[in-house]
Image: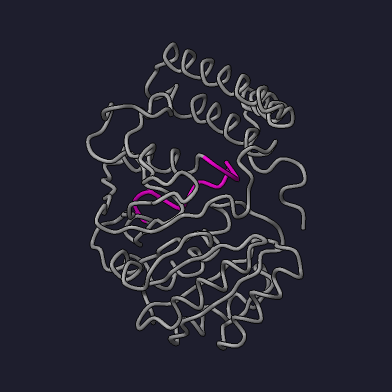
Amino acid sequence: MIRKWVVVLNYNVAAHCVRLLESLWPLADIGIFFVDNGSAPADYAILRDACVQRQALLVEDEGGSGADQIASRLASGAALALVRNRANLGYSGGNNTAIRMLDPLLGQSGEYLIVNPDVFITEATARALLDCDAELCGPAIYEHWSGQIATQGLCVDFGTGFPSKTPVDYPGISTLHGSCLKLSGRALQKYGFLPEENFLYEEEMKYFERVHRLGGNPVYLRELQVEHIGKASTVKLSYRYFYYIFRNRLCYFLEIAGPHYRRHGKFALLYLDWTWDVVRSQARKRNWAGIRGQIRGIRDGFRRVKGPMPGDAQE
């Protein structure tokens, strides 16, 4: 059975997924596993047709008996699969759909490269990441929208959830970018699956805090680089964007950082300053929807609301 897999999550961006499929398929000894996260029927049909043309395994109801059949066929050496979730399970839930199907078959020998559909990656880079011996690793991410390598998450104060100039609690790299991330079966056994309660944004913070606290050491392969177009399935000035980032940062502190690191005063100052900066910047842009999302996110953060906001996980 193939033990190295590229995992790609689709949510209404099938054209990006097909581009990735065309650029990477076929890969010797490496499989590609697509998960459709409850996309619109027309969008899903585009991805489905591209996979069917290449004789992919299909599971169009993740809870049905087809899951057992696909497990059997994957064990027989199939190298391309497509699973359709009935609802949008978010970033972690969607990617975990594929990994949870593969992990019982592969155990510690499995290697999984999560690649967002809006990432441009070469075959050589994908192979180098999957061949890396590290439990967790990721490449340099060139952000197309900013024209720079993303560095913000490489050094984080896990006691507040905000970036820092130097490591605070643990040496080395703090977090890796979720748009292109290699997880091994060994990492899954030690640190578990990606946390699903955030639905969108800040998943890396929660996951890598757990990794570091349990003694893990993510590896940043700066010599490898991919390009992240960004904003393929979300708009980073939208109501939902501000809702999730403010809610999830507050929930992270209340549930994890506060009890473990007890930097309440520092977090309060940083969170208030961040809140005010966003209000001023979005008011100048007259982005009242974004500010409303921010306010609701703060409210729901204090209430420790988890999962998707209404409408984001509709079947």
Is residue 274 left or right of 45 when viewed as pictured? left
Applied colour scheme: one colour
Residue 209: tell me if it is visible: no
In the image, residue 266 sits, relative to residue 51, either above or below, namely above
Q: Residue 203, position in %: x, y?
A: 49, 43
Please state the extent of the stretch shown in magenta in the rendering: 189-201
Q: Residue at x 34, y 61 (%)?
A: 184
Is 24 magenta? The answer is: no
Residue in front for this viewpoint, 232 or 163:
232
User: Looking at the figure, which quarter contains the N terminus?
Assistant: bottom left
Marks counted in the figure total 0
184 or 281: nearer the viewer: 281
Q: Is residue 262 left or right of residue 279?
A: left
298 and 210: which is toward the camera = 298
Residue positioned 45% across, 39% down in the render: 206
Measured from the top left, where is residue 244 in percent x and y? 61, 36
- Say whether residue 199 is magenta: yes
Residue 275 vs residue 190, the one in the foreground: 275
- Whether residue 253 is situated above or below residue 204 in the rendered picture: above
